[in-house]
């Protein structure tokens, strides 16, 4: 038969439990978040390539209006989604290493794009858009894409080649985003002014991961 605690014993246990909880480190709410299931790409939409190149511009003025799931899904697939049965992607990488990861910073949190499962997997449940770049406008863009190379995927390539290949791959991916934005009337700009060390710490990147560039995406700022 279980022994019942008297009031004094109960208060002692409650106090001890509270002390333990107060010493525990803050836990990111990302643990409670669920992955976002993206939609299938709408490949029948868009404009001819020559028109897209004519429309392709960089913009640094954004509306805070969030991107609909369909737009976000199509943009990420355009950037670096799977477009063939063998798992190859919409942007090339040296020896098909697929070493670039796209982190997606939104008002609701930070996510990692999973092209194979067509998901956004939660990383942090906080809005870090404002620290994804040094310019003040980055906090206003609906989405900030952070391009991160994972050197562990690049085999025995020299450090010089790893830097070259990952920079080229990031260029291909970011240009895909530019063309998608031109097609959909979105504003975008690719950025290098980033406190990479601080941002990598917030994102909890491993030593063999490195931030290459970031790219802000959103609706154009409305003029009155």
Image (cartoon, helix red, strand yellow):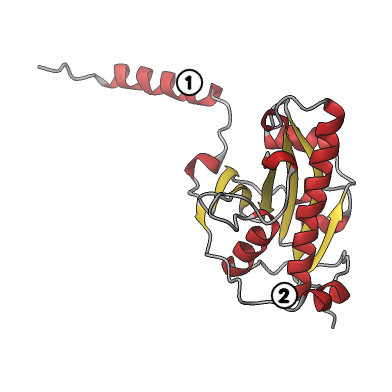
Helix, strand or loop under label 1? helix
Q: Which residue is at the far left?
A: 1
Using the image, tell me which numbered label, if any, was put on residue 20. 1
Residues 215 and 160: in front is: 160
Residue at 75% x, 41% y is: 94
Question: Of the numbered discs in the image, which one, if any, rests on residue 146?
Answer: none
- Is residue 161 or residue 81 the one in the foreground? 161
Screen quadrant of the N terminus: top left
Label 2 environment density (alpha carbons within 10 Å; few <14, some 14–19, many ≥20): some
Which residue is depicted at the point 54% across and 42% down? 29
User: Which quadrant is home to the C terminus?
Assistant: bottom right
The residue that appears at 71% across and 36% down in the rendered structure is 202
Horizontal side of 45 relative to 117 (left or right) equals right
Q: Is residue 171 above or below residue 9?
A: below
Whichever of labels 2 and 1 marks the residue nearer the N terminus, that label is 1
* Residue located beneath label 2 in the image: 184
Spot occupied by residue 220 in the image (x, y as percentages of width and height): 80, 73
Whether residue 218 sits left or right of residue 57 in the image: it is left
The reply to whether residue 132 is in sight is no
* Image spot of residue 189 (x, y percent): 84, 60
Please report contact status of discs 2 and 1: CB closer than 8 Å, yes or no. Answer: no
Q: Position of residue 95 (x, y in %)?
A: 71, 39
């Amino acid at each position: 038969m279980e022994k019942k605690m008297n009031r004094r014993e109960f208060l002692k246990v409650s106090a001890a439990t509270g002390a333990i909880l107060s010493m525990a480190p803050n836990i990111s709410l990302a643990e409670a978040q669920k992955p976002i299931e993206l939609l299938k790409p709408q490949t029948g939409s868009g404009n001819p390539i020559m028109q897209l190149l004519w429309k392709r511009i960089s913009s640094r003025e954004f509306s805070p209006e969030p991107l609909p799931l369909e737009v976000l899904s199509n943009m990420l697939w355009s950037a670096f989604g799977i477009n063939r049965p063998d798992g190859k992607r919409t942007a090339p990488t040296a020896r098909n290493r697929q070493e670039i990861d796209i982190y997606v910073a939104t008002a609701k949190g930070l996510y990692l794009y999973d092209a194979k499962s067509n998901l956004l997997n939660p990383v942090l449940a906080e809005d870090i858009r404002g620290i994804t770049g040094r310019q003040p406008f980055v906090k206003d863009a609906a989405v900030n894409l952070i391009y991160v190379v994972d050197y562990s995927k690049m085999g025995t390539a020299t450090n010089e080649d790893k830097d070259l290949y990952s920079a080229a791959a990031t260029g291909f991916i970011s240009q895909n985003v530019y063309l998608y934005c031109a097609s959909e009337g979105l504003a975008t700009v690719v950025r290098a002014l980033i406190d990479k060390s601080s941002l990598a710490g917030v994102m909890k990147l491993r030593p063999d991961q490195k931030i290459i560039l970031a790219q802000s995406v959103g609706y154009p700022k409305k003029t009155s």
